[in-house]
Amino acid sequence: MSVSQHRRKDAPTARQRWSTLAVTALGLLLAQPAAYAAGFGQLRVQSNLGQPLQAEIDISGVTPDEAAALNVKLASPGAYAAAGLIYQPAVSTLRLEIERRPNGSYVAKVRSTQPISEPFVDILVDMSWASGKVSRAYTFLLDPAGVKPSNESYSPSTVVQAATPDASPATAQQPAAAAAPQAAAPGAAQGAAPAAESARPAAPVRPARQARRAPSAPAASADTAPGSGYTVKRGDTLYGIAGEA
């Protein structure tokens, strides 16, 4: 086999390799924006318990386009509740400021205007830019006063909203609905009472009439008792009456 024939045989294989390399390179280029999207890094505490909070949060993957509209702020109390985190009163005084370091990296300065009295602190931070948004939570421990801050680093955790069952309100309304027939029961009983009274026979009234006639019976027996008196008749004289007595 000649050299020219060997080259023609290997030509399709070379083209396939170049096609594979081109597709791989294109995939890497398309994946770069997602890989270099802005995100939160480690948090370092620089204050103690009973002092205003001072901490730093590393921000990674910031592109020049994202840096122009980059914004970092504390999440709202509603977001804290949805994530199952404690929103302390002193946390409401936190202020976050983005700072660019000499090496080109970015960091978020965390400061509070009031002392932090709780050893465990929950921070929920929102970061947004022109084309995206991300939220991360940090839970860290403050060293007691008088102890040099350990400058320990804390990793962020993904925010997961707490589950809130929707069936609870419907379930709570069922006892109220069941109580309605019970509440109507006394009214029904009151309505049944007059009906029962109207259905009673008039017989109990008769003994009352007999009771009224009863006192007259002894009077009649008293008049007719022998030897108890004499009934005057027309034409009687005193002598005749005395004789009858």
Image (spheres, rainbow, N blue to C red):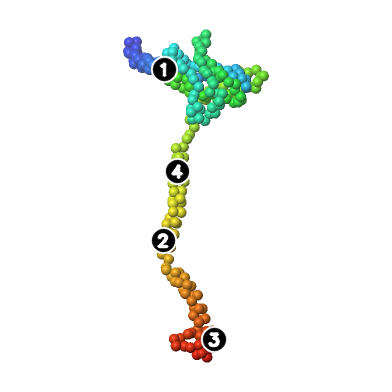
Q: CA distance from mark 4 to mark 2?
A: 34 Å
Label 1 sits on a secondary structure element that is: loop
Q: Residue tagged by mark 1?
A: 130
Q: Is residue 162 visible?
A: yes
Label 2 packing within 10 angstroms: few (<14), some (14-19), many (20+): few
Residue 185, x across and y down, in percent: 45, 53
Q: CA distance from mark 3 to mark 1?
A: 131 Å
Label 4 sits on a secondary structure element that is: helix
Q: Which kind of residue does numbered mark 2 sit on?
A: Ala
Q: Is residue 63 visible?
A: no
Q: Residue at x 47, y 46 (%)?
A: 175
Q: Which kind of residue does numbered mark 3 sit on?
A: Gly
**Front-most of 74 and 8?**
74
Q: Residue tagged by mark 2?
A: 195
Q: Residue at x 48, y 34 (%)?
A: 163
Say whether residue 18 is left or right of residue 222.
left
Q: Earlier in the sequence, mark 1 or mark 2?
A: 1
- Mark 3 or mark 1: which is in front? 3
Q: Earlier in the sequence, mark 4 or mark 3?
A: 4
Q: Earlier in the sequence, mark 1 or mark 4?
A: 1
Q: Residue tagged by mark 3?
A: 227
Q: Is residue 168 above or below residue 141?
A: below
The quadrant of the picture occupied by the N terminus is: top left
Q: Which kind of residue does numbered mark 4 sit on?
A: Gln
- Mark 2 or mark 3: which is in front? 3
Q: Residue tagged by mark 4?
A: 173
- Mark 4 or mark 2: which is in front? 2
